[in-house]
Amino acid sequence: MARGDLFLITAPSGAGKNSLMEALVDLLGDDGRLAFVVSHTTRPPRATERHGVDYHFVADAEFERMVAGERFLEWAHVYDHRYGTAADEVLPRLERGIDVVHDLDVQGAERLRARMPEAHSIFVLPPSFGELRRRLDLRGAEEPGARARRLALSLSEIERYEEFDYVIVNRDLRPAAEALAAIIVEKRHRRARMREVAEAIAGDFRAALGDAAGTGRGRTE
């Protein structure tokens, strides 16, 4: 079985990564061929967040045990808390031929690319500064100071788009999600991923044509 591909999705906070992930499932379906990484974090959950769905929320001591046990592919301090990508969320799925999508911050994506350079990296851009500010205001999940800090950081993050393989502008959700789905579908149809299927089809033709030749029905004038 061909190994799955890892897709790293990053964007400034508020650019719409979570909405893109939800739209991606609608487009590609839930057929077991696509999985999403759930990161670990030491920050407390927000009101609408669920453990094991949005994040694995763990205590500092548990996070430290995972670091000591080398269970993370990457981890870092972000906004006074720690975030990490557990190897168990990624590697076993890739080995089973499942494509893995991971949305994470710019620094996390760069660290994971250094660890797994074969990953496909995608940078999601907001259409403008004003629109990013509007989305953060609508989210209303943080104190004004935290929103201001994220906005101040956004330019330095956006300027690193050139380090990524693909760029998607999330102006309208549906076209942006379709662009993301197209990247994943294109990788699934590369020759290396399709070799097992193609060889099975070729084997069917060999068997059919061999049987026809054996009975004299395989000749053409």
Image (tube, rainbow, N blue to C red):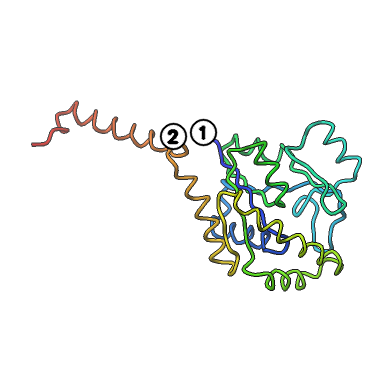
Whole-number angstrom distance, CA of label 2 to CA of label 1: 7 Å
Residue 134: give x, y in percent of width and height.
Answer: 72, 73
Residue 193: give x, y in percent of width and height.
Answer: 47, 39
Label 2 sits on residue: 196
Secondary structure under the numbered disc 1 in the rendered image: loop
Query: Quadrant of the rendered structure where residue 75 is?
Result: top right
Q: Nearer the viewer, residue 164 or 92?
A: 164
Between discs 2 and 1, the one toward the N terminus:
1
Q: Residue at x 51, y 52 (%)?
A: 183
Q: Residues within 10 Å of mark 1 (few under 14, many from 20)?
A: few
Vertically, is 153 above or below 189? below
Disc 2 residue type (three-letter): Glu
Labels 2 and 1 touching (C-beta < 8 A): yes
Q: Nearer the viewer, residue 70 or 15?
A: 15
Q: Residue at x 82, y 48 (%)?
A: 41
Disc 1 residue type (three-letter): Met
Residue 157: give x, y in percent of width and height.
Answer: 70, 56
Please tell me the numbered disc located at residue 1: 1
Secondary structure under the numbered disc 2 in the rendered image: helix
Please tell me the numbered disc located at residue 219: none
